[in-house]
Image: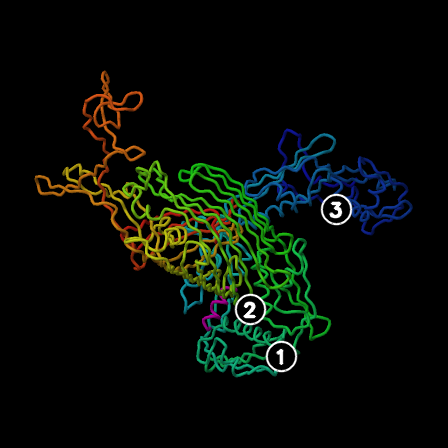
Amino acid sequence: MLSGVPAFAQTAPAQPAAPVQAQTAPAQPQATQAAPAQAEQRIVKSIRVEGSQRIEPETTLSYTKLRIGQPYTNEIVDQAITDLLGSDLFADVTIAGVETGDLVIRTRENPIINRVILEGNRRLKSDKITKEIKLAPRQVFSRTAVRQDVARIVELYRRQGRFAATVEPQLVSLDQNRVDIVFEISEGPKSKVRQINIIGNEQFSDDDLRGQMATKQARLFRFFSSNTSYDQDRLAYDQQKLRQFYLTEGYADFRVTSAVAELTPDKRDFIITYVVEEGPRYKFGDVTVDSDIRDFNNEALARALPMKKGDWYNAKFIEDSIDQLSQSAGLFGYAFTEVNPEFQRDRENLTMSINFNIAPQQRTYVERIDITGNTQTQDKVIRREFRVAEGDAFNSFQVKRTQDRINSLGFFQDKFEIKQTPGDTPDRIILEAPVEERSTGELQLSAGFSSLERFIIQAAIAQRNFRGKGQELRASVNYSTYSKSVELGFQEPYLFDKNIAVGVDVFRQDFNSFNFIGNDRQTTYEQTRTGFQLRTGVPLTEYWSLAGRYGLSYDEVSLDQDQFFTNGRCDPLRAGRYICEQLGERLTSSIGFSLIRDSLNSRLRPTAGERLVLNADFAGLGGDVKYIRGTVNASKFWNVGRGFIFSVLGEGGYIHSFEDSRGPGIDRVRIIDRFYLGEPNFRGFDIRGVGPRVLRIPYTEDPDTGQQVLVTDRDQIVDDALGGRAYYLARAELEIPLGSGARELGLRPSVYVQAGSLFKITRPLPTVVFPTTTDANGNTIVQPLTFPLLDASGRQLYLYTPAGSSAATTTLCAVGVPDASGACVGSTPNTVATTQPIPPFAERFLGNSAKPRLSVGFGVNWNSPFGPLRIDIARALLKQEGDDDKLITFNVGTQF
């Protein structure tokens, strides 16, 4: 009888199974009788299969060469057992009746898998493992599949840098020839890169070269870095990074001769060793351009390239030159220009001469423009942004400009690119615009409570691509204790499909100016504005455009009469003379224009280009106000490489009134028409924290000396910002790139420095002069003022105490007391006239200086699920007396 050894030693369900690694390979089947020296052939008389449960006997026989009526030998029987065991369908096979020819194939089928269980996996989720392995419930168990799945699981962990991971499979037998397979996983620690050794480098230190690599050595300060784990793909990437670094430094012969990663015996760390050959350093030799294109001046093109003869060789300049020459060819209509650099290495003089060979090409024309992916946006909205049309000569600059304009619409996903494919003939090109639309509708509903605004309700709805025509429609409502507004707006960018933009805004705004006394918010003046504005704009050239507007608004500035009025009039002692002078109603009718130059590559998030806006507004076409106001805004952006974006922004403005003087100490420009500076534009300063202001500082008694002194706590001082007629502001900012995960979250940190000022206003007259006395020590004491207390009609009030009462009350009777009809009865004199004391305070006018304020800071933009959010930490380094600085600024919903 021939027999095969089972693949697994079976165990009872309650006992742990032996691991796969402990099993031995099946013994080679042996014949029950020794075969003669020369195989004796016998005839198969009959074949019977025993032990089949799921597998049909015919299927079992199909794996063998045994057939009734055919001769067989012991070798053929041995091969049949081997073939049946190799099918992975059977755990044991024996063949009896070899001597007689009546063969009986006895099999024990491999069990069916009931469950596949993973134990010990914490770093890898079970669903990630199960989709990689082949074993699954209701499949036939096989030893080969188990070994393959063990190898797959180990490989998954190695991809995560866990080279110490081990997998022990266990088999648990169940009834009905079923089994549970349990993979016991020991994940082990993540294998780190303990050391990076570099051999052969003489010109650059190990630290300099390690700094070029993506892989970093595991150190305590890199605890959160993922680059300290070993990655085979990253090893190859680092070799390329080393080569790029040396090639940019002039070492054209540099090569990495070997890169070996050794796993430490404990399988916890790797030691990586690079062997390099630096070679000599080269300089550029002759740099020439060779082209047969008629429009090219080869010598001029060569002079415009970034490298010059005698400069150290830099491979990055070669890549930049190829791009520059390709773009130059594109400007003349050659779309598929091939630029081939030819190198001539002089090893004796260590120079590298380069000839850029531009293959002759035919001028290319745009065959057609294909736009795909737009389901909401109409084709014409996209096509009108194209700077080239079908049939025009190809121009790479115009194609790039088109791409920037479509990105600036904000209707499509970022990184939109126009693809260029060959047309039906060699001189034709097809421009493909595969857009991917994004949501352009915005709905914001919020309610809350703020220590500043108390109850807040905000609702806004906007559609920036209304009806798919590029129109903008918006409406918003804001309500709080101190601010209320309703705004409606509409804009049509192409009126009657002509390049003329028109728009209208209707608004109602209620605003309460305020300051703080301690933790209490004190309302000062209230401003109400109702009006509308009509807008239009036309392009002058590709980059220049002109916009005009007309606005009509009704404004009212008022004060709470109960708090700031005395005897029916604004009380300067309560509100300040500078506030009382601004009360009233007026109608403003103004016309204005803007001259705009815009070459930004994106209006939403620019990384290159510049923008200049000149604004001028004139009020006086009717109405009560006459002034001219001019502002200028300029910005420029540079992509400085590796994801860093540097920008410089500057703005300034001046307003001049044509109204007659309203009195000494009163500025001709009203308080609500002036400029203000501070948060959020000038980070590092509070809201309206820069510029002219009046501080009302109360007197207090020094607890140590008992002398009268001014309060120094800024929170106890009334601070009224007055604004200014002129201002300037400049900012230099560097946006810092983050990893892909942070970019997906919309995080964009930046560092910046700002300088600016707000100034030029008429110095207000003092509100009041308090009387003074001198104490015994010769110190000046500021006395409070007392004013007679009058009724609503301006009549003096007197104090008297009714008979039988200890509480005093007021009366209009200087003598006697009032009867039921109000007449004064009696002769008792009420000689105590009621008075209202005004505590002394010092009033100081500060901040009216053109000297620059300076701040530096760090900020983070986050495109959060709640809307755009920005957090800034900025410190004011230069400020003027009276300025109100602020360290941390938090803004939600601002534009950035």
Is residue 786 depicted above or below 210 in this figure?
Answer: above
The kind of residue tagged 3 is Gly
Q: Is residue 294 left or right of residue 274?
A: right
Question: Dot 1: what SS?
Answer: loop
Residue 243 lies in the magenta-colored region:
yes
The kind of residue tagged 1 is Ala
What is the magenta range? 240-250
Q: Mark 1 near mark 3, Cβ–Cβ under 8 Å? A: no
Q: Is residue 258 visible?
A: no
What residue lies at 61% left-to-right and 83% top-to-bottom? 294
Which residue is more in the foreground, 388 or 283?
Answer: 388
Other residues around mark 2 within 10 Å, as few (<14) / some (14–19) / many (≥20)? few
Sequence order check, earlier mark of 3 and 2: 3
- Residue 86: give its label: 3
Give the CA separation, mark 1 to mark 3. 62 Å
Is residue 21 depicted above or below 800 in this figure?
Answer: below
Q: Is residue 239 left or right of residue 512?
A: right
Q: Is residue 64 left or right of residue 817?
A: right
The kind of residue tagged 2 is Glu
Other residues around mark 3 within 10 Å, as few (<14) / some (14–19) / many (≥20)? some
